[in-house]
């Protein structure tokens, strides 16, 4: 039996909807193909945290609806964990609109729980009693840099209005005059561009006057009227956002619908800007209070709210938190891409039992070696062995830190391509670990993470004879394992001759042949100057400058993936600069009697001493000017504390971060 025969769906014909990348634009535009959305629903696994997350969101909304106020939702997870996919499926299930073939999202789910279906029915019933059900979803960062305008644009687009605030006000005026739909019909596909340019657009003015001539004597008069009635608005406030969202949701409705608003990739949009964080905090607070419990805000980000200073301020507003992890993605992959037939699973289980000796010796002595509990997972994960999958996970994590995860798309895509690799080989042929190199080599080279000499050598060797191909595979592994050597004391995976051979075995019945050939391949690579021994392991042969550069890049990656460390360095640098500025001012002569008062520097929330002159320090990354002034104004007149805010200069913020990374 071939590997392809054990799968429920042949890997060569399996297609991951949208290539595994969930882009949220909801509702889809008129005329948009629905097949991708239907495929995504059919492969949406609702067990694990995905199912529990959906239930928590729906149950919380039901409770908030009864109380007249909602708790906002934050969905977090690493790249490729499925957070955007979960949010997109929530949008589809929320409205549950019929497709053209008569199906609806809730009927396409594979194996949904009874509790989930019951909550969806309850939501539909509540929607029928209210003004219906509505969902608006989009990714922040695609338009305005102002969180308020970006959020408003997503809601406006969901009801068929232009994203521009000024143009939307004109649309509301047309609705008040009873001609919005008629003008839209006259202009057709040109409606959005025409209304955005309402002052200059001849077609727009003609369409308006054709529907209601009494609005102006002629096109010029209408243009003057529109220019006067709808000037360029000042900066939008949160109150403006709330009232405009309400107006948009009531368009062609008598009652507010039960509304879901999804903002994707919020953390990435916020960056380290405290003003943006404050805006999102205020938006969540306003949405919770202004819509009688009929509007639910859901945001996504890679990290949990308590992990970063700029996100911690959102904790009080986003009280429903869904965290997706590796176990959730594992479950999805096993029930979709790697799903076996009953007979196929039996065949794989029998083969694994026969090859247990070979499998159990792989990576012996490491933290990722074969375990007794791997028995069931080994069948589910086949043709990838659990021990090798754990190696992959660590390499993928290292790539995620380096910013190259975009080339990997998702672990699901990697799993599918690995299954295709061995589909035409007999059951017993596992995916070799070096396969992962082919998924990211080009991106790693472009990012400066893969030495050109190593890449060129691998490419040349792969085009040679069998011995040279094996040398190429060894070199791939030496490079890959080098990416995770910073944590080698934790996981124990080191590029020794034995480990390299374990990871290269494909045919589990011929492991001895590989172990006999690998030392020869290593010797050839060492002689060619491609690798070198170092403290019992093999590493790429590099010059001292290249080694220093690799260490520097590793530290840079760590900082980029660990914003809290960057924040700590920033605070340290600011403290050092402040100490330098205040040098020689250990005390200050105060009052008529010139009493020496010791300067005491305080951080926010630290208690001032009973003696001494307190100087409370704030920085513009953790606190905004508005927050600081509000805190100061609440203090009694007798408080003698000096408050110092080191303001964040937006124009210099990126340069400062780069300098901190290079320290």
Image (cartoon, grey):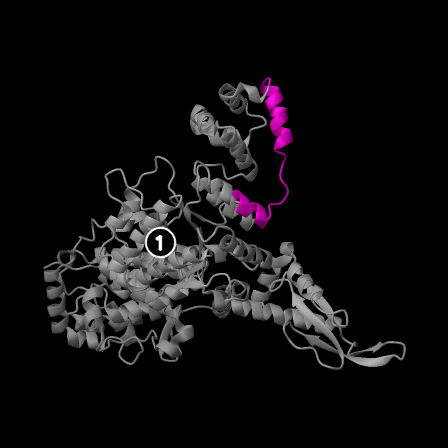
Q: Quadrant of the N terminus?
A: bottom left
For residue 499, above or below residue 343: below
Residue 125 is left or right of residue 633, and the answer is: left
Instruction: Name the image quarter holding residue 379.
Output: bottom left
Confirm whether the magenta stretch covers residue 350: no
For residue 421, above or below residue 642: above
Give coordinates of residue 380: x percent, y percent: 20, 65
For residue 425, above or below residue 550: above
Residue under circle 1? 85
Seen from the viewer's position, the closer of residues 113 and 339 is 113
Residue 260 seen: yes
Seen from the viewer's position, the closer of residues 616 and 362 is 616
Give coordinates of residue 555: x percent, y percent: 50, 69
Residue name at image x 57 percent, y 45 percent: 240
Seen from the viewer's position, the closer of residues 367 and 122 is 122
Residue 463 seen: no
Residue 654 is left or right of residue 105, and the answer is: right
Instruction: Classify 10 Å Cα crowding around label 1: few (below 14), some (14-19), many (20 and above).
Output: many
Instruction: Name the image quarter holding residue 658.
Output: bottom right
Confirm whether the magenta stretch covers residue 239: yes
**Majority secondary structure of the magenta segment?**
helix
Residue 310 is left or right of residue 55, and the answer is: right
Seen from the viewer's position, the closer of residues 221 and 574 is 221
Give coordinates of residue 417: x percent, y percent: 26, 55
Q: Which residues are magenta?
A: 217-244
């Amino acid at each position: 039996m071939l590997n392809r025969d054990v799968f429920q769906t042949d890997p060569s014909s399996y297609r991951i909807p949208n290539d595994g990348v969930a882009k949220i634009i909801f509702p889809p535009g008129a005329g948009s193909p629905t097949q991708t959305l239907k495929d995504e629903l059919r492969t949406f696994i609702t067990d694990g945290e995905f199912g529990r997350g959906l239930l928590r969101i729906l149950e919380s909304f039901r409770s908030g609806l009864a109380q007249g106020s909602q708790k906002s939702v934050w969905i977090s997870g690493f790249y490729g964990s499925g957070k955007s996919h979960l949010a997109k499926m929530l949008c589809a299930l929320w409205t549950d609109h019929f497709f053209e073939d008569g199906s609806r999202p809730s009927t396409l789910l594979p194996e949904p729980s009874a509790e989930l279906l019951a909550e969806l029915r309850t939501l539909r019933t509540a929607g029928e009693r209210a003004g219906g059900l509505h969902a608006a979803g989009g990714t922040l960062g695609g338009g305005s840099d102002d969180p308020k305008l970006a959020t408003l644009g997503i809601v406006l687009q969901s009801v068929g209005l232009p994203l521009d605030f000024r143009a939307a006000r004109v649309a509301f005026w047309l609705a008040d005059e009873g001609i919005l739909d008629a003008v839209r019909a006259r202009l057709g596909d040109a409606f959005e561009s025409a209304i955005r340019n309402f002052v200059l657009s001849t077609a727009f003015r003609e369409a308006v006057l054709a529907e209601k001539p009494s609005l102006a004597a002629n096109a010029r008069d209408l243009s003057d009227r529109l220019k006067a009635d709808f000037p360029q608005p000042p900066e939008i406030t949160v109150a403006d956002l709330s009232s405009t969202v309400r107006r948009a949701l009531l368009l062609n409705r008598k009652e507010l619908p039960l509304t879901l608003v999804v903002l994707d990739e919020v953390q990435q949009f916020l960056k380290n800007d405290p003003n943006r964080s404050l805006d999102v905090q205020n938006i969540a607070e306003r949405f919770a209070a202004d819509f009688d419990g009929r509007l639910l805000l859901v945001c996504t980000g890679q990290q949990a709210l308590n992990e970063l200073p700029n996100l911690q301020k959102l904790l009080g507003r986003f009280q429903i938190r869904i965290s997706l992890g590796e176990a959730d993605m594992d479950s999805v992959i096993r029930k979709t891409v790697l799903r076996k037939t009953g007979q196929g699973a039996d065949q794989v289980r029998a083969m694994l039992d026969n090859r247990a000796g070979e499998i159990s010796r792989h990576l012996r002595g490491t933290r990722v070696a074969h375990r007794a509990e791997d028995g069931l997972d080994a069948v589910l994960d086949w043709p990838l062995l659990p021990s090798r999958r754990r190696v992959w996970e660590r390499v993928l994590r290292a790539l995620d830190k380096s910013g190259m995860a975009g080339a990997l798309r998702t672990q699901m895509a990697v799993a599918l391509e690995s299954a295709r690799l061995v589909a035409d080989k007999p059951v017993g042929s596992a995916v070799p670990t070096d396969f992962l190199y082919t998924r990211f080599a080009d991106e790693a080279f472009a990012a400066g993470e893969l030495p050109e000499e190593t890449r060129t050598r691998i490419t040349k060797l792969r085009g040679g004879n069998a011995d040279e191909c094996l040398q190429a595979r060894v070199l791939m592994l030496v490079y890959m394992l080098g990416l995770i050597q910073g944590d080698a004391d934790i996981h124990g995976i080191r590029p020794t001759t034995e480990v390299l051979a374990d990871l290269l075995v494909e045919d589990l019945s011929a492991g001895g042949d590989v172990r006999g050939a690998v030392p020869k391949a290593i010797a050839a690579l060492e002689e060619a100057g491609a690798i070198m021994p170092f403290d019992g392991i093999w590493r790429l042969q590099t010059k001292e400058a290249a080694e220093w550069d690799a260490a520097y890049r590793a530290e840079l990656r760590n900082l980029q993936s660990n914003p809290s460390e960057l924040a700590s360095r920033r605070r340290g640098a600011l403290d050092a600069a402040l100490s330098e500025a205040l040098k020689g001012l250990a005390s200050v002569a105060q009052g008529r009697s010139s009493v020496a008062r010791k300067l005491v520097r305080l951080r926010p929330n630290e208690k001032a001493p009973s003696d001494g002159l307190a100087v409370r320090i704030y920085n513009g990354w953790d606190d905004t000017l508005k927050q600081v002034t509000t805190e100061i104004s609440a203090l009694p007149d007798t408080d003698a504390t000096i408050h110092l805010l080191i303001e964040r200069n937006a124009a210099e913020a990126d340069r400062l971060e780069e300098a901190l990374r290079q320290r």
